[in-house]
Image (cartoon, grey):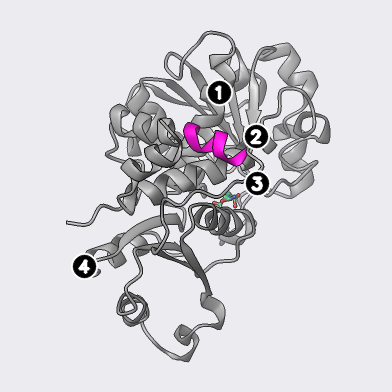
Amino acid sequence: MTDHLLGMTGLSKVDIFRYLDVAQAFVEVSERDNKKVPDLRGKTVVNIFFEPSTRTLASFDIAGKRLSADTINVNASSSSMQKGETLLDTVRTIESMNPDVLVIRHSESGAPHFVAKHLTRTAVVNAGDGAHEHPTQALLDLLTIRQHFAAEGRGLEGLRVGFVGDVRHSRVARSNVWAHLALGNKIRLIGPPTLVPADFIKVFGSDDVSVVHNLAEGLQDLDVVVCLRMQLERQDQNFVPNLDEYSKEYCLSERLLMRHAPRSVVLHPGPLNRGTEISGEVADGPRSLVLRQVNNGVAVRMAVLSILAGSVESRTMSLGR
Ligand code: NCD
């Protein structure tokens, strides 16, 4: 059976640490002058994106190239799906060309799972499906948090992590929450009732997840604050009166962080809407790990591709260990 990475749901702490450990080794590769390793030489990675993307697509593409794979990016808006082909026919056609890994982003929740069920020889990676999951983003967030706290002699466990903003539409928040639950961390979902409905926690079925509607109260003593983008493209009704009103109550400012969570670090998956969900001062300030996240994104995707394409042994060799 082919292995896939479809979500963080169901991944154990051991699975998560395996991805992070391999990724950490690739961070070092990405800092070398010569960033290319031969691990996936002769392998083919197809990135098929049915939604616009800048950083995630670039990150997967760079990751595949640094591993010496042949990478092909299919912009699905210009693909034959526009000519009426079904998703299944499209991916079966691609599988007939014998790729090793198919990375898929789609606006429908569950599309990568559907594809994985029907392909027989190709590993599938979910690069974001609707508001459902975005597992490589959760892994790169975890790697970033782990690196930060390692410097303070702390690990990834025993943390208080808050997600601020448009949790309802966020696949990043969902994947992260599943991962932090597997690690035994405490999670706070912070935002207006329309974007963080109180009964939302039922989805996770855990007492370790709580909902707070007031930003100052929600930030109290957090170690990690994950700021989420207002995802207007997924909002089919008015969830907030207008963006000005929203930012008055929920824009993450340095003043609030200093007062309520002075030692916290801030993450954001990008793209940032400065002045809406995050102030420029926070985004560019010392507690921001945003660029570190992007940097780690390549290493995480290298780890995912090399694990799923089955080359972790050769990776270890190429790293000279
Ligand atoms: C996220 C996504 O697409 O879900 N962005 C990303 O992958 N870099 C978050 C977002 O779009 O807000």
As drawn, is 169 to the left or to the right of 244?
left
Disc 3 crowd, CA 10 A, few/some/many (<14, 14-19, 20+)? some
Residue tagged 4: 120
In the rendered structure, which disc, 3 or 4, sits on the residue that comes first in sequence?
A: 4
Residue tagged 2: 292
In the rendered structure, which disc, 2 or 3, sits on the residue that comes first in sequence?
A: 3
Please tell me whether the stretch drawn in magenta is mainly helix, strand or loop: helix
- Point 66% across, 14% down: residue: 261
- Point 60% across, 61% down: residue: 53
Query: Is the shortest distance between ligand 1 and the CB of mark 3 under 8 Å?
Result: yes
Q: Secondary structure at mark 3?
A: loop
The answer to whether one can see residue 28 in this image is: yes
The answer to whether the residue labelled 2 contacts the one labelled 1, judged by CB atoms less than 8 Å apart, is: yes
In the rendered structure, which disc, 2 or 4, sits on the residue that comes first in sequence?
A: 4
Quadrant of the rendered structure where residue 151 is?
top right
- Front residue of 272/209: it is 272
